[in-house]
């Protein structure tokens, strides 16, 4: 069922962009959507039932790799509301913190509906955030960089809180990590570190690239300019 949904959405995208879309955008969407599918269908998904570190790794792939690739494939010329960058950052932060809080996180192991609500809202808010900052017009670059800085900081803070917790936080992973040679606390620390360190590097790159383009006085904004025109 999931595979059918992924293929169906991809088909709709390619039909929608068959005439107006560029080849580069089609490749970006295909790569981002394939990454989304792999994160949800591959053995990593099954492993995330046992290991918190695997679940965080899955979320990092979805939000920091797949979502920005899909965002870059979407049109940029849509009307924006005042402060959209910060609203997008806030929505992503809420999804991230809520679904990595012990109560809501634990519930994803009880209800399939809650499990998929976690994935949809986390990926959806991440894609909206990345579309807002990566496809921003040049005159919104300052707000985009500010939103990216805030988002990188809040994700690093969440990762640090999880990493430095003195006791296991998530009951679904109180026993299963032992099967993989980890204690529950070690597994939790691995997950927090994955969110904290690699995530920070990705956000740092997303901050530096647009600023570097401005200093070089490039006519394009954001990462789209770095990729070049189709």
Image (spheres, rainbow, N blue to C red):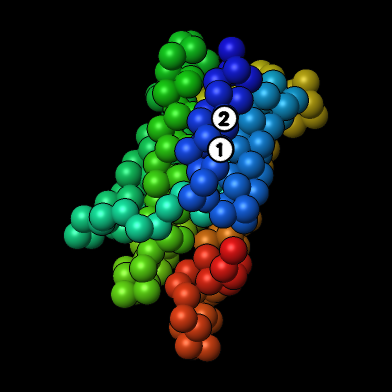
**154 in relation to 9, above or below:** below
Q: In the structure shown, which secondary structural element does the residue marked by tag 2 occupy? A: helix
Q: Is residue 220 left or right of residue 183?
A: left
Q: Which residue is mark 1?
A: 14
Name the residue nearer the viewer: 46 or 214. 214
Pointers 1 and 2 in contact (CB under 8 A)?
Answer: yes
- Percent position (x, y) of residue 131? 43, 53
**13 in relation to 205, above or below:** above
**159 in relation to 85, above or below:** above
Q: Which residue is mark 2?
A: 11
Q: In the structure shown, which secondary structural element does the residue marked by tag 1 occupy? A: helix
- Percent position (x, y) of residue 104? 40, 25
Q: In the displayed image of the protein, which residue is found farthest to the front? A: 19
Q: Is residue 220 among the parts visible in the rendering? A: yes
Q: In which image quadrant can residue 24 be found?
A: bottom right
**49 in relation to 225, above or below:** above
Q: Is residue 97 among the parts visible in the rendering? A: no
Q: Residues within 10 Å of mark 1 (few under 14, many from 20)?
A: some
Q: Residue at x 38, y 38 (%)?
A: 95
Quadrant holding the C terminus: bottom right
Q: In the displayed image of the protein, which residue is found farthest to the left? A: 82
């Amino acid at each position: 069922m999931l595979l059918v949904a992924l293929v169906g959405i991809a088909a709709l995208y390619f039909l929608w962009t068959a005439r107006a879309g560029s080849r580069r955008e089609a490749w970006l969407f295909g790569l981002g959507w394939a990454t989304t599918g792999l994160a949800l269908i591959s053995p990593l998904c099954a492993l995330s039932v046992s290991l918190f570190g695997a679940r965080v790794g899955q979320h990092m792939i979805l939000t920091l790799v797949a979502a920005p690739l899909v965002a870059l494939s979407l049109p940029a010329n849509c009307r924006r509301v005042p402060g959209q960058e910060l609203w997008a950052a806030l929505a992503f932060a809420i999804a991230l913190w809520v679904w990595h809080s012990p109560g809501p996180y634990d519930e994803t192991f009880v209800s399939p509906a809650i499990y998929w609500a976690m994935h949809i809202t986390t990926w959806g808010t991440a894609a909206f955030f990345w579309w807002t900052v990566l496809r921003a017009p040049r005159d919104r670059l300052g707000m985009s960089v500010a939103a990216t800085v805030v988002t990188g900081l809040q994700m690093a803070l969440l990762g640090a809180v999880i990493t430095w917790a003195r006791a296991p936080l998530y009951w679904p992973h109180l026993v299963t990590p032992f099967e993989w040679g980890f204690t529950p606390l070690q597994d939790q620390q691995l997950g927090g570190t994955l969110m904290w360190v690699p995530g920070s590097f990705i956000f740092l790159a997303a901050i530096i690239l647009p600023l570097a383009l401005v200093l070089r006085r490039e006519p394009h904004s954001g990462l789209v300019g770095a990729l070049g025109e189709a």
